[in-house]
Structures are given as C-alpha cells and as structure tokens.
Amino acid sequence: MAAKVKRANKALQELRAKSGEDLDKELGEAYRQSFTVRLQLSTRQLTNVNEASKVRRRIARIKTIQREKELEAAFAAAEEHGS
C-alpha cells in the first residue's frame, strides 16, 4: 500500500512541475484516452475494466492542478495589487 501512495505522490509532483501549456496537452491526451476506453468498453474489446476509472481520475487530477495554479496566480496578483 505504501508503494502505491509513493507512486501517486510522485505522479502528482510530476504533474505539478509541468507548465499550464503542458497540462493542457496532458488533459487533451487524457480526454482522447477516455474516448478510446469508452469505445472499447462499449464494444467489449476492453480487457481491463478498471481502466475507465483510472482515466477519469487522471482527468480530475489534471483539472485540480490546473485550478490550483489558477488560484495561485490570482492570489499572487491580488497580493501584488494590494501592496
């Protein structure tokens, strides 16, 4: 279990290190992968049914990190404007 948490934290750190443009590319790729997985699931070609939930979680993580960066930038701008 601890190894799984370490891998998840490492993946989050890698995503957080990426720029906004790179996150947009990752999100687009995740959406394409989601479409592919849904298509395979509906045609019964998908062997690992857990793949769909993994892709949905990946999309949620990327969106969360994008929102964190957005709020961080807004907060920094507000502090700069207020000072």
Image (cartoon, helix red, strand yellow):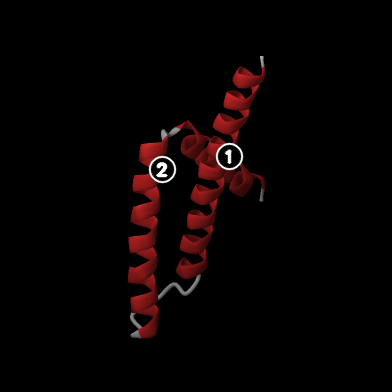
Q: Is residue 24 left or right of residue 67?
A: left
Evaluate whether residue 46 shows in this view: no
Residue 74: image quadrant is top right
Q: Tag 2, which secondary structure?
A: helix
Q: In the rendered view, does 78 fall on the left or right side of 26? A: right
Outermost residue, bottom direction?
Answer: 43
For the residue marked with disc 2, what is the amino acid?
Leu
Amino acid type indicated by mark 1: Glu
Q: Position of residue 51 (x, y in %)?
A: 46, 67
Give the answer, above or below, for where 75 lies relative to 15. Answer: above
**Disc on the earlier residue, 1 or 2:** 2
Nearer-the-camera pick, 71 or 38: 71
Spatial CA distance of label 1 from label 2 is 12 Å
Secondary structure under the numbered disc 1 in the rendered image: helix
- Residue at far top of view: 83
Residue 34 in the image, given as x and y percentages of width and height: 39, 66
Residue carrying label 1: 68
**Relative to residue 76, is residue 27 depicted above or below?**
below
Question: Who's the residue at 56% across and 48% down the image?
Answer: 64
Rendered residue at 41%/42% (across/down)? 23
Q: Position of residue 47 (x, y in %)?
A: 40, 76
Q: Residue at x 47, y 31 (%)?
A: 17
Q: Residues within 10 Å of mark 2 (few under 14, many from 20)?
A: some
What number is the disc on residue 80? Answer: none
User: Image point 47% across, 74% down: which residue?
Assistant: 49
Q: Position of residue 8 (x, y in %)?
A: 57, 45
Report the side of 66 relative to 43 (left or right). Answer: right
Position of the C terminus by quadrant: top right
Q: Residues within 10 Å of mark 1 (few under 14, many from 20)?
A: few
- Report the disc number at residue 23: 2
Residue 75 lies, with reference to residue 40, above or below; the image says above
